Amino acid sequence: MSKENKKREDKQKKSDFKAFLRKRAPFYLAGIALIVISAYGVLSEKNLENHFPEITSEEEQIVNILMKYDGPNESGLTVMQAIENKIKEEYPDEKIFDNKKTKVELNILKINSDEYQILLNFQSHKGEINYDWNVNIGSEKIVSNNPESKYIINLVDFYD
């Protein structure tokens, strides 16, 4: 008799669990779907770095010196973040990095053995912004060559 009781209890537990799932499965599926949809939006969001062209590893090191520069006091704001903020100020009501007409040109020219010129040209459907810096890879010193790039460096240097 005890075997029969165990079988009945097992069947009852399984049927209770099935009934529980039948009642709540749509809610669980809806919750999972919402999580997946919201995660997809965050993971697929584009930024400035996604628009950079393919570059060599040496050029990538030079660009990293510039883009990760966060001022003499290590303020926390990097050149990359400052450029993205400036672009978002110019296009406040748009997801400009998702626009198909948005293009970024990145040219790295060797001046001498330790110094390179980085030209960053951001083009959108409304206009363009040009940045021009000289980067010394030995001292990691950055020099601005135009007003737009000087503004970005000043913003990073004096960020509180």
Image (spheres, grey):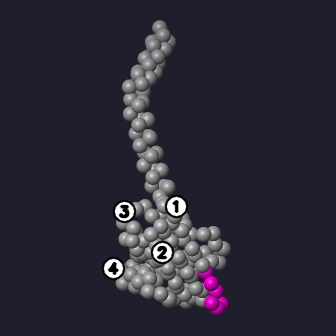
Residue 7 vs residue 148, the one in the foreground: 148
The answer to whether the residues at label 4 and label 3 have Cβ atoms under 8 Å apart is: no
Compute the Cα span from label 4 to label 3.
26 Å
Relative vertical location of residue 124 with respect to residue 4 in this rendering, above or below:
below
Q: Can residue 85 be seen from the camera position used here?
A: no
In this rendering, the count of numbered labels is 4
Compute the Cα span from label 4 to label 1.
35 Å
What amino acid is found at the position of numbered circle 2 in the picture? Glu
**Mark found first going from the N terminus, 2 or 3:** 3
Image disc number at residue 24: none
Residue where numbered disc 2 is placed: 128
Relative vertical location of residue 29 with respect to residue 146 in this rendering, above or below:
above
What amino acid is found at the position of numbered circle 1 in the picture? Lys
Residue where numbered disc 4 is placed: 160
Q: Can residue 154 be seen from the camera position used here?
A: yes
Magenta stretch bounds: 108-114
Q: Residue at x 41, y 83 (%)?
A: 151
Compute the Cα span from label 4 to label 2.
28 Å
The answer to whether the residues at label 4 and label 1 have Cβ atoms under 8 Å apart is: no
**The image quarter in which residue 135 lies:** bottom right
* Relative image position of residue 47 (x, y in whole percent): 48, 65
Residue where numbered disc 1 is placed: 100
Residue 15 vs residue 78, the one in the foreground: 78
